[in-house]
Amino acid sequence: MSIDAAISAKQTSLQSAPTPSGRRRATGARMLEDLPFAAAHPLRTLAWLMNTGWRGYCYLLLVFLVKNACFWGPSIAVALVVEIIQNPAYPAWWIWFPIGGQALLLAINIPGHVYYVRLLSRRIRNLERRLRAALVRRLQQLSLTYHHQAESGRLQTKVMRDVEMVENLCRLFFQGGIEALVTIAIALGVALYHEPQVALFYILATPLCLLLLWLFRKPMQQRNRDFRQGMEDVGSRVSEMIDMIPVTRAHGVEGTEVGEVDRRLCELRNRGIELDHTNALFQASSFVVLRGVELIALAVFASMIIWSDLTVPLLVLFMGLFAQMVMSIMRLLHLFPQYARGLEALRSIGEVLECPDLEDNAGKPAVSEVAGEIVFAQVDYRYRNRSEHAVSELSLHVAPGECIAFVGESGSGKSTTMNLVIGFYRPSAGRILLDGRDMQELDLRSWRQHIAVVPQNVILFSGSLRENIAYGLEAVSEAEIQAVVRAANLEEVVAQMPEGLDTLIGENGVQLSGGQRQRVAIARALIRDPRVIILDEATSSLDVIAEQQVQQAIDNLVAGRTTFIVAHRLSTIRHADRVCVMKQGRCVELGSQAELLARDGEFARLKALQG
């Protein structure tokens, strides 16, 4: 089977028979696109992420009340025992009723707690998955401009650490937080039923605790924000350091790199110390205030026994409930620093999920067929925060199947032009027409399914050679793989591999040479049967022999396809139909190589410089 026949059959099968797994992925994509997120409304956002519904929350609360009844029973049980002992009208053996009831509640707690945690864990783990999946999807949707400005280490921190902090926030709320709130509500309810004056005292004591929250809220939020940003900064620097290890070793500057990372670690340590200091001051202050309130309560209740008809059993009940209420308030106050960290993590995630810098493809028609005609009509492009244009007044008509080369000095706008063709960048002015249709009006995701890019720095992942070639495709046949291996001049490479196409090639293809990685990239492009090819300095870093092997593969790749070649080495563009010479973002010369050499202009100067 020829390569064109094999790939044509592949494309037909994919278009005519969508797989069930493909349908599942589409459903999941819609779910994530509809995911509501608003960092300004964290509680509402968390409720959406839990995806439980009011019936689910009511059921969770019911299970929680049943399994936690043993925590609120002791105060009532002690009050009943005291009442039975003090009142001769009650038989002494009646004390076993409150004691037995408390024992039964304790027995229910173990299975109840396990069941509650199981219900809660399913929902929180689902939240964790949905949030990370939403982040990954949004990172794929954000513009290349955003990714050029963002640091990968910071983004990794948001996907892993910040989502973990949000998960912890949910666990704290549904375990410690709800318990404290329900305890406070029960204490107020019992006090209101028996003695409204006591309930009033409970209510008046609460603002003292809320005052602490008001005093410490902003400092703790700021300390948590500083610490989170420090963590992102360190994560980004460590990621960069790992990528730079070969360069660092080659220049003998390991000490400099270690010193720079250590400096940032020291800054992170100092921010952590400030955060811990603020948390410690808050916790100590809350402890002293709440214990002071307990002393005031003891004095108030003792006075009520002396000056009113408050009985000893009710004193025991109110003091027990008040102690539980104070402990619950203290628990909420101690959990507040962790809540603050979780809310700050939620705001951090919002920096990605709420970023408006998206590629807008919604509602636009898909590109189903591509002939390969591309027209630049007075196209300008300027990078953000730059005054000068990277591409200026570019007008160019590329016919279907034509091979056109872009040459020029570094910074002349060649790679920017290629990013405009791919659709990574949108023109600041002018239009780009794809087969007569304005690129701005098309779904560029579908457009990119018809193009292939072979860059100078090939990116491979740490899978097998087969997986790297068939990246992103399903059910690729062995015949298709073998066809593109031959066309990409990879047969000798595969034969040398211990497990052939199933050999693992290491992270970023570390076990392959530069020329071999380029040929893998060409095979990856070929198997997609693209109608438009972009070769961005595909052979500039190779030696003569490797360049010859890659060039043979390129010749097979570009045959019959619209091709854009970006090149510094003019020897790699010998098959180009036309050459576009770029200078300061403008096309200063355009024509065949023979025509440009005859003009004795910019192209002839570049040719002379390379001998």
Image (spheres, rainbow, N blue to C red):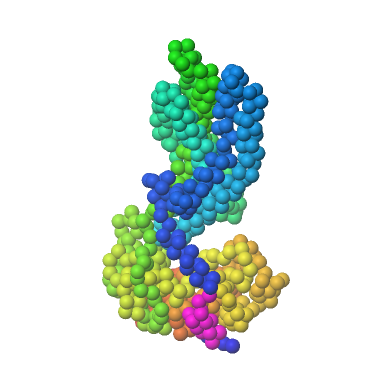
Query: How many marks do you count on the picture?
Result: 0
Name the residue nearer the viewer: 451 or 103.
103
Name the residue nearer the viewer: 373 or 35.
35
**Residue 231 image point, x, y percent:** 51, 43
Q: Furthest-top residue in view?
A: 306
**Residue 133 image point, x, y percent:** 50, 58
Residue 446, by quadrant, is bottom left
Residue 197 in view: yes
* Residue displayed at 52% across by 27% down: 321
Q: Furthest-front residue in view?
A: 89
* Residue displayed at 52% across by 20% down: 315
Residue 488 vertical position relative to residue 387 in the rendered view, above or below: below
- Horizontal side, residue 566 vs residue 5: left or right: left
Residue 233 vertical position relative to residue 90 in the rendered view, above or below: below
* Residue displayed at 41% across by 79% down: 368
Residue 520 in view: no
Q: Of helix, strand and loop, which mostly describes the magenta segment?
A: helix
Question: What range is drawn magenta here?
Answer: 5-19
**Residue 482 image point, x, y percent:** 62, 81
**Residue 141 image point, x, y percent:** 42, 61
Q: Quadrant of the N terminus?
A: bottom right
Name the residue nearer the viewer: 231 or 333.
333
Q: Is residue 279 magenta?
A: no
Q: Is residue 11 magenta?
A: yes
Name the residue nearer the viewer: 248 or 339.
339
- Horizontal side, residue 424 vs residue 28: left or right: left
Residue 40 vertical position relative to residue 486 in the rendered view, above or below: above
* Residue displayed at 43% across by 57% down: 35
